[in-house]
Amino acid sequence: MTAVDQAVLEDRATAVRIALDMLAREGAAAVSRARLAELTGLPRATVDGWFPARADLLAAVVEELIRRRVALHAPKGSPREQLRAHLDVLNHALDGDATVFRAFGELAVAAVRDPAIAGLLSAADLGWYSWLVDLLDAGIADGSFRAGLDAGATAWAIMAMFRGLCLQHGLGRDCADVVVDQVERLLLPEGAA
């Protein structure tokens, strides 16, 4: 790869991050190629070359969201330790750089009216769902989680909980901590601490 190719990729990656911030701050309706060209100072033709349609821009933003969310997975330890670490990281991210959560929240709201966004969001959720189901199945098998737990339904419930938390602006850190702790307790075998 030449230095010019690398610079183009870095400019595109920067443009995607700016579009992600735009989505989180202003909502899905504000995300456009024209606005992105304005904010980045790039020629509109360059932005249109990278993203021939608005759907392509939104797809690139969703890919960036997935990349950031995957970074929140905790790959070490027992299934229970991994899930606890994942829940903690997600919960703490709500307080810190909440861009990922605000952006997913904005997409969830926009998906109700826009089938293209609904499709992007559904595809993004599939990877998270699969990871959670595998983790929950492993925890059920090793006794970390309750026997008879429905891993698929539990994965959807965890995802819905965080989707709901990201839409609850001003909920308060203490309340979010209690919700996450309660979810974990519901998964544990009776008598487990």
Image (cartoon, rainbow, N blue to C red):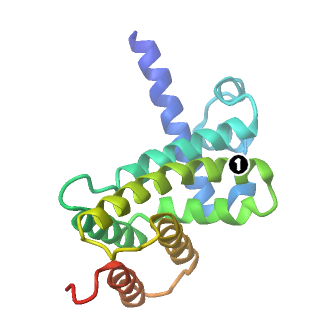
* Image coords of residue 56 (percent x, y): 68, 35
Name the one closer to the observer, 41 or 66.
66
* Image coords of residue 139 (percent x, y): 29, 64
Hey, which quadrant is residue 191 in on the image?
bottom left
Left or right: where 21 falls relative to 68: right
Name the one closer to the observer, 69 or 188.
188
Q: Is 72 placed above or below 185 here?
A: above
Please report the residue visible at 59 percent of the width from the left and 46 percent of the height from the top: 19
Residue farthest to the front, as pictured? 148
Please report the residue visible at 67 percent of the width from the left and 27 percent of the height from the top: 43
* Image coords of residue 38 (percent x, y): 67, 41
Please report the residue visible at 36 percent of the width from the left and 78 percent of the height from the top: 187
Please report the residue visible at 53 percent of the width from the left and 31 percent of the height from the top: 12
Left or right: where 185 falls relative to 159: left
Q: Is 53 placed above or below 138 here?
A: above
Hey, which quadrant is residue 58 in on the image?
top right
* Image coords of residue 24 (percent x, y): 58, 60
Q: Amino acid at mark 1?
A: Gly
Name the one closer to the observer, 123 or 142.
142
Query: Which quadrant of the rendered structure holds the C terminus?
Result: bottom left
Q: Is 146 placed above or below 76 here?
A: below
Question: Which residue position is annotated with label 1?
Answer: 119
Secondary element type, mark 1: helix
Left or right: where 81 falls relative to 60: left
Name the one closer to the observer, 172 or 11.
172
